[in-house]
Amino acid sequence: MSKYDEILKLEQTLKNDQYGEMIRDDTHKGTMDDPIPMPYIRYYDAVNKLIEAVYAFHKAHPEYGLDRYTEVLEENGCGGTQLDNVDVSAMDGKCLMALFISLVRGERFCDGLILDNLKNGAVLRWIGRLKQVNADMTAGMRQISIKKTDITGLDSDAIVNAANSALRAGGGVCGAIFSAAGERELQAACNRIGHCDTGSAVITPGFRLRAKYVIHAVGPQWRGGNHDEPKCLYNAYYRALELAAENGCKSVGFPLISAGIYGYPLSEAWRVAMSACGDFLAAHKGAGLSVVFAVLSDEIFELGQEILSESLCNAD
């Protein structure tokens, strides 16, 4: 199963206009987190399954920040556009899922909105694009590997520093990178930049490292998971990859960001890392990037291999 599988597997049913029997549903009219019972609403079975699939995706992937789905749509130039008129030909998975959430939430205020967009073909167009995104994600995940090695010794075009927002030399991976690059030179380059927001990244030369660049990505501190940590971590990875591509890099080495003193749970940290890197590589096939994660701990290495293998199986 891919992360989109519950939606993709509805395609054939919807193509055949087999919406199923009308069933009563008392739970799905409302917000994502607090459905408002509407006892007189009845849905076709296929509509109900689509709603359930969208809810499940939203719950499973907090890194997308889809509580603010309208912002995602606006960032992609389709805010305020009629759903059946949205051009999805170049959309990534995150934006497509924002569309699906917009549709499901819109049903709360406009009975029959989902069925209308099934019948006019809009939902099938979105699913068709989602299939292509899923295929691209499969190819992208194959460009990711994990090594048990010191990140400072990688010969990647760029390596990523698990940075703090002040861009100061720290401990752990950050301290090792500063030391290997030449702390005085690297700190001076960081001082010229001055600051980096959590969930973002900046780039400096690699100085004495084998890597040409150091990309400083600021992950979140773990505070229980309810303070946009998954979204910030996802964005830090994604922005680091954007900077790598913008600077002509073909290979990037990552640590497991936020998993050290910032306390991010290891399994969740790996899942967000795979999600962000897989999504970027799917959306930027022409960049020709490969990603390697460099870790030292047996536990982190083995868990990463397990989650990468799982992600590859899911993508297939």
Image (cartoon, rainbow, N blue to C red):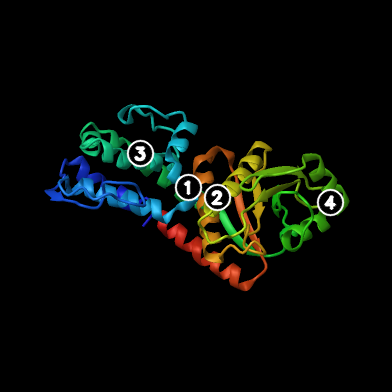
Residue 99 shows in this picture: yes
Say if mark 2 contacts mark 1, CB within 8 Å.
yes
Tag 4: amino acid: Arg
Dot label at residue 208: 4
Foreground residue, 289 or 104?
104
Question: Mark 3, mark 2: which one is toward the viewer?
Answer: 3
What amino acid is labelled 1 in the image? Tyr
Q: Is residue 183 left or right of residue 284?
A: right
For residue 261, which numbered disc appears in the image? none
Query: Residue under circle 2?
Result: 234
Q: Quadrant of the C terminus?
A: bottom left
Mark 3 and mark 2 lie on one chain; the one further toward the N terminus is 3
Percent from the top left, x then y, of residue 89? Answer: 40, 32
Q: CA distance from mark 3 to mark 1?
A: 14 Å
Name the foreground residue: 211 vs 196. Answer: 196
Q: Secondary structure at mark 3?
A: helix
Residue 70, placed above or below residue 8: above
Residue tagged by mark 3?
Answer: 102
Please report whichever mark, 4 or 2, sits nearer to the chain's N-terminal start: 4
Answer with mark 3 or mark 1, whichever residue precedes in sequence: 1
Q: Is residue 3 visible?
A: no
For this orientation, the residue located farthest to the right is 184
Report the Cα–Cα distance between label 3 and label 2. 22 Å
Secondary structure of the residue carrying tag 2 is: helix
